[in-house]
Image (cartoon, rainbow, N blue to C red):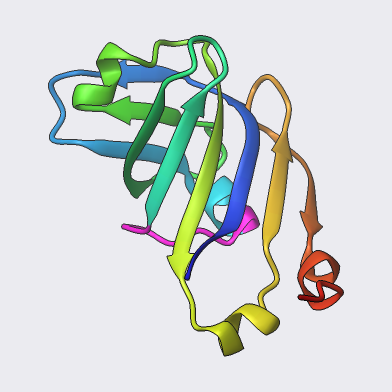
Amino acid sequence: MQVCVSKIHRATVTDADLNYVGSITIDQDLIKAAGLKPHQVVRITNLSNGTLWQTYVLPGESGKGEIVLNGPPARHFQRGDVVIILGDAFVTPEEYKTLNPKVAFVDEKNKLIKVEEHKDLISNWTE
């Protein structure tokens, strides 16, 4: 099954580069805090206009707070837009039982505020 394993909540787009090959560049500190991995597929939803885009993660420089949409999504995401970045993964039913999704909360400058783990939501789920 495909599940959301991590999330960066309400990040602010710092740039959009139409002439780049593609992807989303994310500050390495945020990648690590959310439990994302370089080249992992993510979905980005733009709270400013409702756009949902799928791409992959490229690590940016640590501590700069970068959230840069590269390539075609630069048409739909602009500097200052607020986004939610969702990290997807395919897991087996057994892997799902031990999943520990993380949510990284950031401020308006994309500085980490806190990280929540949502293991209990999954381990307490009954079918």
Nearer to us in this view, 24 or 61:
24
Tell me which secondary structure the magenta stretch mostly adopts. loop
Residue extending farthest front: 127
- On the picture, is 115 further left or further right than 30? right
Up-down relation of residue 96 to residue 11 (above or below)? below
Q: Which residue is drawn at 81% across and 72% down?
A: 125
Nearer to us in this view, 3 or 111:
3
Residue extending farthest bottom: 94
Query: Picture quarter containing residue 47?
Result: top right
Up-down relation of residue 43 to residue 120 (above or below)? above
In magenta stretch: residue 105: no
Up-down relation of residue 34 to residue 93 (above or below)? above
- On the picture, is 92 further left or further right than 7? left
Q: Is residue 91 visible?
A: yes
- On the picture, is 124 further left or further right than 15? right
Q: Where is residue 13 in the image (x, y as percent from the top left)?
A: 48, 20
> Where, quadrant-wise, is the C terminus in this rendering?
bottom right
- On the picture, is 21 further left or further right than 31? left
Nearer to us in this view, 88 or 38:
88
Q: Can residue 61 be seen in this view?
A: no
Nearer to us in this view, 104 or 55:
55
Q: Which residue is drawn at 38% across and 16% down?
A: 77
Tell me how many marks there are: 0
Q: Residue at x 19, y 18 (%)?
A: 18
Q: Position of residue 123 (x, y in %)?
A: 81, 77
Q: Which residues are the magenta region?
A: 33-40
Q: Where is residue 44 in the image (x, y as percent from the top left)?
A: 45, 34
Q: Where is residue 117 in the image (x, y as percent from the top left)?
A: 78, 61
